[in-house]
Image (tube, helix red, strand yellow):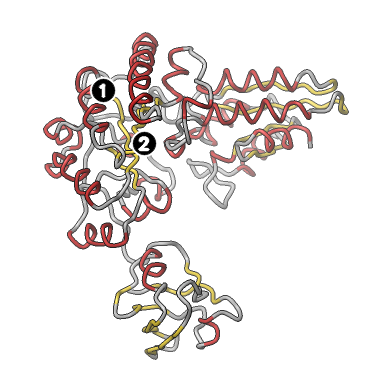
Amino acid sequence: MGAPIMEVIKASIADAVGLEPGDTLLSINGQPVEDLLDYQFYSQDDNITLVIEKKNGETWSVDIEKDFDDELGLLFEGVVFDRIRLCRNRCMFCFIDQMPPAMRETLYVKDDDYRYSFLFGNYITLTNLSDDDWNKLESMRLSPLYVSVHTTSGPLRQQMMKNPRAAHIMEDLQRLKQAGIQVHTQIVLCPDLNDGQELVKSINELADLYPSVQSVGIVPVGLTGHRDKLPHLRTFTAQEARELIEEVNQWRNTFRSRFGIGFVYLADEFYVKAGIPVPPADYYDDYSQIENGIGLIRLFMDDWQEIKRDLPNQIDPVQVFLITGESARTVMQTVAEDLNRVKGLGVEVIVVPNQYFGGGVTVTGLLTGTDIINCLQDNYRGKKVVIPEVLLQEGSTMLLDNITLEEIASRTGVVIRTTDGSARSLVEAVLY
């Protein structure tokens, strides 16, 4: 298939040898180019031979002599040029299996691609790796990777993921360790299934693999109202969340003595459920589990403490409404209280219930245009409403249910401003 060239940087090596947008890079030194990793890895050599399929159908072989760190100057659309590796599991807690219908098609794609794990921090299960994939992982030393473990018990993991290959998780992690690859792991915690003594066993066995296993992030199972014909699961109670927080804190004290880090990190949702403030910044060490959303509230609140010092004392009168999900209610109400100390500024939080997903879904990032429209109705016409960009498809104004910001504004009459999720962006959206 090769790598379709989207752009050639002017005055680059590729430009000098006559490569053009629309050409396809087939191989480097005889190695096929299936993804951006292949391109970056094989193009580092001093002497390389490119096989190019020109856009007119001709095939070129181009010999290039360069310094080791010289870039060729090719840009591609996307990072995977062959087929994305799809998930082969049927996890009983899979969020995609319990999503409502009629959303963007790409939301229903179950990817489980080690390349996305290395490049973007996506969590993978290691259950679909071929021998070639393993060879590539080991030869390129793709580290760190992000692995969904859930449990170190082979039989239980196989039961939870409905895939015999899932039972080999400890062998897979040992192989990564032997290859010198570091791993950040995830446990989706399901009450009465992989918690309790099973969780204790998993944490201890993952800790035995330190420093190859660098961290463990524990997140609560997410359940929607669309679980027809799926196994029965339940969410954690507030009391169970409090007990888990206490237990994890005890483990963390031990690991901090052994490793110098807490090693185990609980998702923000556990603290929200328990009604306990999220821990201070030093709990999260280097925020290694931030791709899991672990520590986002603390990062935002610490940024807010800095930003709010520069708020003006007074502005021209304006009223602003902040859209949020139920789980961020307390945080956003704290922000609103601080903003309301600015004379002339009136800020109110609008907590939007997630009826579209239903179940126990409360995170802001899964709000839909439908729920926002139903919540606003015609009650805020002409008012400024701030909506977080985490709700939007990247590079567009479309929400999960294919409704756009423009449609929300048209149907409710509100004036929409967006924020990228940072404290500074929120202040700019509110004040300007």
Give the secondary structure at mark 2.
Answer: loop
Quarter of the view holding residue 161: top left
Q: What residue type is labelled 1?
A: Leu
Disc number at residue 259?
Answer: none
Residue 419: percent from the left, percent from the top?
Answer: 65, 38
Nearest the viewer among 9 and 426 is 9
Nearest the viewer among 413 and 151 is 151
Residue 142: percent from the left, percent from the top?
Answer: 34, 55
Query: Which residue is denoted by mark 2 in the rendering?
Result: 99
Quarter of the figure with the C terminus: top right
Residue 187: percent from the left, percent from the top?
Answer: 30, 31
Q: What residue type is labelled 2?
A: Met
Q: Residues within 10 Å of mark 1 (few under 14, many from 20)?
A: some
Question: Is 93 left, or right, of 130 in this rendering?
Answer: right
Question: Is 297 left, or right, of 48 in this rendering?
Answer: right
Give the secondary structure at mark 1.
Answer: loop
Quarter of the view holding residue 338: top right
Residue 273: percent from the left, percent from the top?
Answer: 43, 16
Disc number at residue 233?
Answer: 1
| Residue name at image x 25 percent, y 21 percent | 195
